[in-house]
């Protein structure tokens, strides 16, 4: 039974977004197209909204307060992925070699919104490339990030080559709203089709209902993994760039766990960790011997990001 508010609006959950329009799911599982009130759509997938029926469609009247919003921002635009997330599954592959810069950016965006990130490294069946990639992720495991090996085979009779890995993945997703994020070619579509066998059909139906005329991969879509609708997987478009212009460079070290622990030892409270005397971060980088220290590569990524964000316009 759906409860009508005093304003005549109904509660709903945004489960897909295509341009300005979105698909809203009611508490009893019905789905319908909704349009924004006004010219610009403020609702994103994962939002709880109040909507007003109009014939066989609806209008989003209000977006409820969010617990978080995962997004990226560059010079040109802001791209919101999803709201009210429990975790972000960052899917990368052993081959082609993943970008550590892009991984770091996604982790920082998650940390800034207090969303738990999980790193999943696909193609564990490729022994040598996987070994190199796994070693490359050693600093992230030391920082406390969960790093999960996966071997997802697209378009085969046995889509998972390791059942233990699959069971671990399912356990991590249970009871959570999880955004799957990653570059093109990492295996996102294969992962979605593995966990939600009817995903392709459902996506086609949504696209047809919205008459979007676009490739369905350009949208973000929420899929329920279980019949009880307690575990959700949110599939997002692949990306090549991940801008962090919404991050203040002076806060950057707080979102990088390996730097954050040593930043507490700095002599100056407003230390940039680039040149100041008595900097705990710089001294740790120079020491370079501790297994839980700051690698030269991670410090280089920090320095490059700090320079980039210092030049970015503040919004």
Image (cartoon, grey):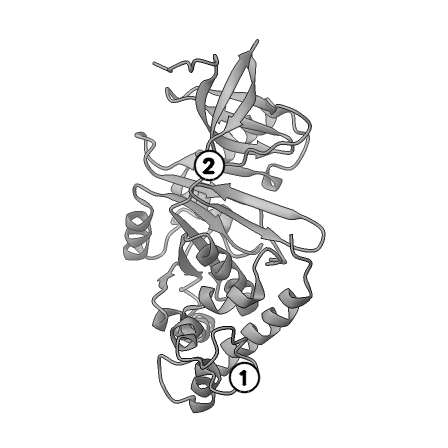
> In what element is the residue under mark 2?
loop
Mark 1: give few (<14), some (14-19) or many (20+) Cα within 10 Å.
Answer: some
Tag on residue 46? 2
- Residue 134 x, y percent position in the rendering: 41, 71
Q: Position of residue 242 (x, y in %)?
A: 60, 57
Q: Nearer the viewer, mark 1 or mark 2?
A: 1
**Residue 56 percent coordinates (x, y):** 55, 11
109 vs 153, nearest the viewer? 109
Mark pair 1, 2: CA separation: 43 Å
> Looking at this view, is 62 or 165 the one in front?
62
Residue wearing tag 1 = 276
The picture quadrant where one finds residue 140 is bottom left
Give the left or right position of residue 238, taking residue 139 as reference: right
Q: Quadrant of residue 204?
A: top right
Helix, strand or loop for disc 1: loop
Residue drawn at 68 percent across, 48 percent down: 77
Q: Nearer the viewer, residue 22 or 114?
A: 114
Q: Is residue 98 visible?
A: no
State the count of labels: 2
């Amino acid at each position: 039974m759906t409860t009508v508010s005093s304003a005549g609006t109904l509660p709903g959950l945004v489960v897909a977004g295509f341009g300005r329009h979105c698909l809203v799911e009611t508490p009893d599982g019905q789905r319908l197209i909704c349009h924004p009130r006004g010219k610009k759509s403020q609702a994103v997938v994962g939002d709880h909204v109040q909507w007003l029926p109009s014939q066989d469609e609806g209008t989003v009247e209000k977006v409820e307060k969010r617990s978080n919003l995962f997004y990226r921002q560059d010079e040109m635009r802001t791209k919101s992925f999803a709201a009210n997330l429990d975790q972000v599954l960052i899917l990368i592959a052993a081959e082609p070699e993943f970008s550590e810069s892009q991984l770091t950016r996604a982790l920082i965006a998650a940390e800034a919104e207090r969303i738990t990130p999980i790193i999943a490294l696909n193609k564990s069946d490729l022994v040598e490339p996987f070994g190199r990639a796994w070693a490359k992720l050693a600093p992230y495991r030391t920082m406390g990030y969960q790093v999960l090996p996966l071997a997802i085979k697209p378009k085969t009779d046995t889509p998972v080559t390791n059942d233990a890995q699959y069971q671990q993945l399912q356990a991590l997703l249970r009871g959570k709203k999880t955004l799957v994020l990653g570059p093109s070619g990492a295996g996102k579509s294969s992962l979605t089709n593995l966990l939600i066998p009817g995903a392709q059909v459902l996506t086609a139906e949504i696209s047809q209902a919205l008459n979007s005329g676009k490739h369905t991969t350009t949208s973000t879509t929420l899929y329920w993994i279980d019949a009880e609708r307690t575990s959700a997987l949110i599939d997002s478009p692949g990306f090549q760039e991940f801008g962090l212009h919404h991050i203040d460079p002076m806060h950057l070290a707080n979102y990088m766990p390996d730097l954050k622990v040593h930043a507490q030892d700095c002599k100056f409270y407003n230390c940039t960790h680039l040149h100041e005397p008595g900097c705990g971060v710089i001294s740790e980088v120079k020491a370079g011997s501790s297994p839980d220290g700051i690698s030269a590569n991670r410090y280089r990524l920090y320095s490059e990001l700090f320079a980039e964000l210092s030049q970015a316009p503040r919004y």
